[in-house]
Image (spheres, rainbow, N blue to C red):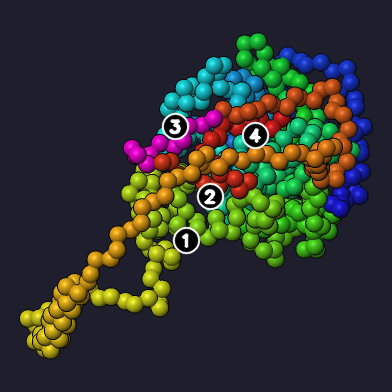
Amino acid sequence: MAKVSSKLAALLTTLSLTCVGTIVGVVPAFADQPITTQPYTTILGIDQLHAQGLDGTGVKIALLDAPVDTTVPELQGVTVIKKSFCNIDYKPSSISHATEIASILASPYYGWAPKATILNYASPNTDDVPDGETMNSAWPDCNAQGHTWSLGYLVEQALNDGADVISISQAGDIDASMVYPLVRAALKGVPVVMGVGNDSQPFIAGTASANTVVAVGAVDASGQRASYSNWGDGLSIMAYGGPVAARDPDSTGKLSVITPSTQGTSFSTPMVAGALALAKQKWPNANGNQLERVMFDVIDGVADHASAQPTTGMGFGVLNPPLLVATDPSSYSTDNVLTQKASGTRPKPDDFTAYQNGTADPTWTSGDNEYVYRGCDPMILKYGIPSGTKVEASTAPECQPSPSSPQTTNSPVPINQPGASIPWGLISAGVAIIVVLAVAVTLLTRRRKPGPPAPPMPPMPQHWPPTYTQPPIPPGWTPTTTPGTWPATPNPPQAPPHQPPPYPGPYPVQQPHPGPPGVVAPTIAPITGQTLTRTVGPPRRST
């Protein structure tokens, strides 16, 4: 079982008493004054870490969400670099969501890393698609390079820009275009942190279930799994998910409404990303995969390279930020510990091999400024190279002839060179053989006699083909079925009245990536191992 240190459990119990007074009798307020306190800063040790001089200096945190409203009081003085690759009219609720995530990461009042650089990559969710529209009709300029709003493309941009950790508080659809960006992030040692969703169900939402992803569930003030949090195979870690105070839009769209009791795995995600950012500042030479291993190892309160096996209910356990930051990661492996966290999901070992050898289909590496296609697939070389992709054709190991294959030479000795001779003996023997064969064929043709005529074909029988009669079903027989069951996980308690509602599906269907006339768009097995032809929609918020 995943364990929580006694000290952390005691602190979370204290938080439960604090939050009761915060929630009861409180109504949203209208103010431009900053939110200066949050119940988790002392409880999770953020104040203690800041007192050590850890504030995120020199660290880049990529935030994939809607555009952040940098005018709110909580983010004054914070470095937020906004990046958008197409024109989307984001709704105020989406901007509010992104702004609160950025505030948890970097607000000088209650953020984890106020001196970090926040790279804000604009990513829409299903709420942003106008009624009666599709993403292609609503955002026509977003279809360049395979869909520049997709999470896969934005992860590539974050890696191009040198992000140290990537925080995604959106429950993206299972998107095959995320496979190679996740491979690249794991090879570079950049943690990708995602929320698992708020459906109170035993499954991990969307791309958070993929291998290599740090899938974050939420705990409540007592340290137990929050009633709204999903769980299941692939869950990595739990972190505090609320209540937190946040800004919501008023009737004009301005973020002037302060709501003191929001919650969700969207908020537990930046808790993990922020803690990893401070660990990166403390240990700047550490690989992000090492920091992940430390994070899972110290959950039980001991840095002993012996973390418990993750469970479907709590993952490795509850985040322990002070011990994560304090533990020297240099003795931990630089390999990503989550490459095989869930059975039947991608990326798989073959995906890593294909990417490293340069034989991965470059259609699915769109936006990667480091990938070089070295394969020898003639269709890819003719039609499937996106603009800007680096190519060193046929240099991959599998494109080279094996040592046992006969080698041919392209440089024969010219017959007019000294030492060259014409093999007249072989030529004469060849001519003689051809003459003998011609004579033999002539004799056989003359001796061949015609055979007897073939017998006439009998007429087809009537009633052809034969008909088939269904045999009678024995009296009293009924088909039997064996009902399936979810993993044996206790049912969660009922959600509190202020729980935000889950965001409904299904996602809009994305059109296949365009190719040259007459060429079928490439297909790839998605993260779950089924067949997918890029039928993905924009992500949804995980709150």
In this rendering, the answer to whether 134 lies above or below 421 is: above
Relative to 313, 74 lies left or right: left
Q: Which residues are magenta?
A: 509-519
- Residue 520 coordinates in the image, percent (x, y): 41, 41
**Secondary structure at numbered mark 4:** strand
* Mark 2 crowdedness (10 Å alpha carbons): few <14, some 14-19, many ≥20: many
- Dividing the picture into quadrants, the one containing residue 398 is bottom left
- Residue 137 coordinates in the image, percent (x, y): 46, 22
Relative to 364, 116 lies left or right: right
Q: Tell me which numbered mark, 3 or 2, is placed earlier along the sequence.
A: 3
Q: Which residue is mark 4?
A: 170
Q: Tell me which numbered mark, 1 or 4, is placed earlier along the sequence.
A: 4
Q: Are marks 1 and 4 in contact (CB under 8 Å)?
A: no
Q: Which mark is residue 143?
A: 3
Q: Which residue is mark 2?
A: 180
Q: Which mark is residue 169?
A: none
Q: How far apart, in angstroms, are the residues tagged by discs 3 and 1?
A: 28 Å
User: Looking at numbered disc 2 in the image, what kind of residue is underneath it?
Assistant: Tyr
**Secondary structure at numbered mark 2:** helix
User: Looking at numbered disc 1 in the image, what kind of residue is underneath it?
Assistant: Asn
**Secondary structure at numbered mark 3:** helix
